[in-house]
Amino acid sequence: MKGFKVLQAGLFTTLQDQGRNGYKHLGITESGAMDEYAYLWSQKLLNNKNANALEVMVGLKIEVQESTIIAICGADLGFEINGMSKPIWQTYSVQVGDVLSFPKRVSGQRSYLAVKDGFHTKKEYGSYATTLKENIGSKVQKNDILTFTTQMNYPKKYVKKAYIPNYNKTLTLRLSLSYQDRYFSQEEQEKFFNSDYEITLESNRMGAKLKGKPISPKENGIISEGICFGSVQIPQDGQPILLLKERQTIGGYPKIGTVLAIDCFRFAQLSVGDKVRFEKIDLKMAREKTLKFYNFFKDDKED
């Protein structure tokens, strides 16, 4: 069976979906697309249901060996077809012999390449998501063949400009205080919400270590407990850690709160050295915004 032949694997190309749930009691993390907003748009454009996509971080180059329909959403990585620059956040019909490439980072960190009906691969623990630290799936390698079902006829679709994010815009992360906010005095909370924090080199799919004014909790440690997506831990050095898709399943540092998931998706497009701020959001509003986000992508009507 044919599909895409990988000519250059790129920096860190993996197959992802929305991640796996229900296995944290086994120590298996959620994983999945770091930027679900871009991932879900790639699926919506193709009318895919629970399919996977390639998460690309620059340098991927593939040869088309079977005609199909693709969608590209997310970071601007200089996407090209046969050496010609092409706009993203839309679909393309690609033919046998075409070469698709992502040669340079212009803005953002992660782009998503989806094919109509998804790539052929088996689910593990209920998901297509790759999690290398748990030996689930693998990085895309040179000479891999990424197979799919041939697709020829599909209407051209675009994401409206109003829905395309500006990855160069300064990001404020909305955070709901946790039940552990009692470990942080009013003074320390005010410091946290009125400081800039820089993304450091100690950042990956597991989480991001931030650098700024240190926050001092009343307790340096707690009994280890489950950790949700977007939790902000404060370790002994006082520098916040934002926990992301491949976070550990339990942890023992106090958590000042949890960042709204949709803001974490946007955070995944930032680079080392970029700065963020935090602002409070109440739990009711956070739930409403999250439901609105996912309901939008469940809606099959054209936008």
Image: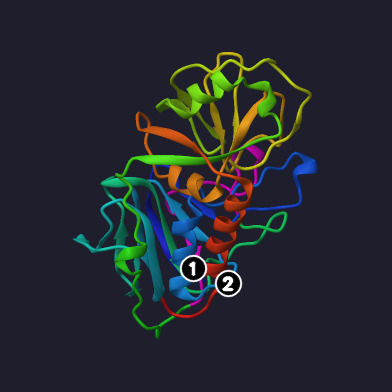
- Residue type indicated by callout 1: Gln
Residue 147 belongs to the span the image colors magenta: yes
Task: Report how far apart the C-alphas of labels 1 and 2 lie in the structure.
Answer: 7 Å
Q: Which mark, by number, is residue 220?
A: none
| Relative vertical location of residue 113 with respect to residue 91 in this rendering, above or below | above
* Rendering coords of residue 16 (x, y %): 54, 55
Circles 1, 2 touching at the beta carbon (< 8 Å): yes
Residue under circle 1?
43
- Residue 239 among those drawn in magenta: no
200 and 93: which one is in front? 200
* Residue at the limit of the structure toward the left, as seen here: 84
Write down the region rendered in magenta: 129-149
In this picture, residue 15 sits left or right of residue 69: right
Q: Do we see residue 58 in this rendering?
A: no
When asked about the image quadrant of residue 201, the answer is: top left
Q: Quadrant of the C terminus?
A: bottom left
On screen, residue 45 above or below 10: below
Tell me the amino acid under the disc marked 2: Lys
Image spot of residue 213 (x, y percent): 45, 18
Q: Residue at x 33, y 40 (%)?
A: 170
Q: Coloured how?
A: rainbow
Which quarter of the figure has residue 197? top left
Magenta stretch: dominant secondary structure: loop
Question: Which residue is identified by label 2?
Answer: 49
Q: Residue at x 47, y 40 (%)?
A: 173
Left or right of residue 206, residue 95 in this image: left
Residue 207 percent location from the top left of the image: 54, 34
Residue at 56%, 13% (x, y): give it: 237
Please tell me which residue lies in front, 150 or 269.
269
Q: Secondary structure at mark 2?
A: loop
